[in-house]
Structure formats: C-alpha cells, structure tokens
C-alpha cells in the first residue's frame, strides 16, 4: 500500500477531500515521500545521519555570522 492509498483510506468519510486536493496542489512531491517510506528504518536513519553530517560540514565551512545588536 502506498502513501496515496493510506491517505485516501485515512480521510475517507471525513469530508476533507477539498483539504486533500489542496495538499496535492500545494507542490509537494509525494513520490519522494513514497520512495523514502520504502526504505527500512535503519536505512532512513543512515540517510538522516548523512544529511546531518553534510549540514555540520556546511556550518563549519561558513564564517560566523555577527549577532544583531
């Protein structure tokens, strides 16, 4: 079952189809979410850890920003 099917089932009977349509029209690429959910939890955790290493590397490579007074 993919995220679209799960979403369809979770909102069925709640009268929130306009909200769901707005979600899909909002520009969010649901296929990226679906691909991530296909990964096992340890794989997702490793992807996140890799992302955080990148964030830390980018932060350490930038000069400090002076505090606003």
Image: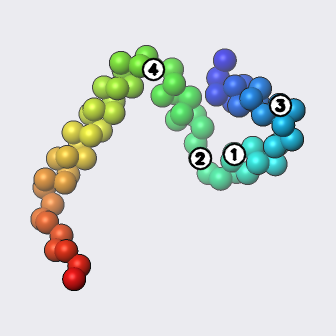
Circle nearer the N terminus (3, 1): 3
Q: Nearer the viewer, residue 27 or 17?
A: 17
Q: Residue furthest front?
A: 69
Q: Are marks 1 and 2 in contact (CB under 8 Å)?
A: yes
SS for tag 1? helix
Q: Is residue 27 left or right of residue 52?
A: right
Circle nearer the N terminus (4, 3): 3
Q: Are marks 4 and 2 in contact (CB under 8 Å)?
A: no
- Disc 3/disc 1 C-alpha distance (Å): 16 Å
- Disc 4/disc 3 C-alpha distance (Å): 27 Å
Q: What residue would you read off at disc 4?
A: 39
Q: Is residue 53 above or below residue 68?
A: above
Q: Are marks 4 and 3 in contact (CB under 8 Å)?
A: no
Q: Is residue 28 above or below residue 38?
A: below
Circle nearer the N terminus (4, 1): 1
Q: What residue would you read off at disc 1?
A: 24
Q: Is residue 11 left or right of residue 15?
A: left
Q: Residues within 10 Å of mark 3 (few under 14, many from 20)?
A: few
Circle nearer the N terminus (3, 2): 3
SS for tag 3? loop
Q: Position of residue 62 (x, y in %)?
A: 15, 60
Q: What residue would you read off at disc 2?
A: 28
Q: Position of residue 56 (x, y in %)?
A: 20, 46
Residue at figure coordinates x 84%, y 37% from the top left: 14
- Disc 1/disc 2 C-alpha distance (Å): 7 Å
């Amino acid at each position: 079952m993919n995220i679209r099917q799960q979403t369809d089932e979770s909102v069925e009977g709640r009268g929130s189809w306009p909200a769901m349509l707005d979600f899909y029209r909002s520009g969010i690429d649901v296929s990226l979410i679906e691909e991530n959910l296909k990964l096992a939890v340890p794989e997702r955790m490793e992807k996140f850890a890799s992302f955080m290493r990148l964030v830390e590397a980018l932060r350490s490579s930038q000069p400090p920003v002076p505090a606003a007074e």
